Image (cartoon, helix red, strand yellow):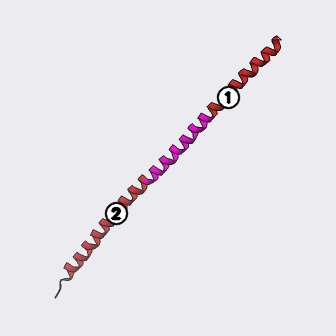
Amino acid sequence: MYDECALTNDFFETIENINTKVFEKYNNLKDVSENLIDIINRADFEKRINNLLNLNDKNSHLIDKFKKKSEDCIRQCRKFETT
């Protein structure tokens, strides 16, 4: 003969243990997923910052070239005016 209460208790204890493990795994997965999303967002943000820095460098170079050409043009105009 078997004890129904003992079987029922064992069953519910097993279910409770499974639920606890599932909950722990869910929380771990949630944490990992959130960390991964943060890493992806951070990487995307860093990539955008690097792109902006590269554009800034290119613009600085173009501005320097423009400034030099402008100065050359002003010099040539002054030479023309004085002759």
Of all residues, the one furthest to the bottom in this rendering is 1
Percent position (x, y) of residue 83?
83, 11
The amino acid beneath tag 1 is Lys
Picture quarter with the N terminus = bottom left
**Residue sticking out furthest to the top:** 82
Question: Of callouts 2 and 1, which one flags the residue occurring earlier in the amino acid sequence?
Answer: 2
The quadrant where residue 60 appears = top right
Horizontal side, residue 9 vs residue 76: left or right: left
Within 10 Å of disc 2 (Cα), the crowding (few <14, some 14-19, many 20+) is few
Residue 30 pos. (x, y %): 40, 58
Q: Which residues are magenta?
A: 36-58
Disc 2 marks a residue whose amino acid type is Lys
**In the rendered view, would you say 46 is above or below 72?**
below
Secondary structure at badge 2 equals helix
Residue in the image at 31% along x and 68% along y: 19
The front one of 30 and 45 is 45
31 in relation to 23, above or below: above
- Viewed as shown, does residue 67 lie left or right of 43? right
Q: Is residue 12 above or below residue 53?
A: below
Magenta stretch holds residue 46? yes
Residue 80 lies, in percent from the top left, at 82, 15
Look at mark 1 in the image and give the residue it sits on: 65
- Secondary structure mainly formed by the magenta segment: helix
Q: Which residue is nearer to you in this view: 46 or 77?
A: 77
Within 10 angstroms of label 1, few (less than 14), some, or many (20 or more) residues?
A: few
Report the residue at 42% width, 57% height from top: 33
Q: Which mark is residue 25?
A: 2
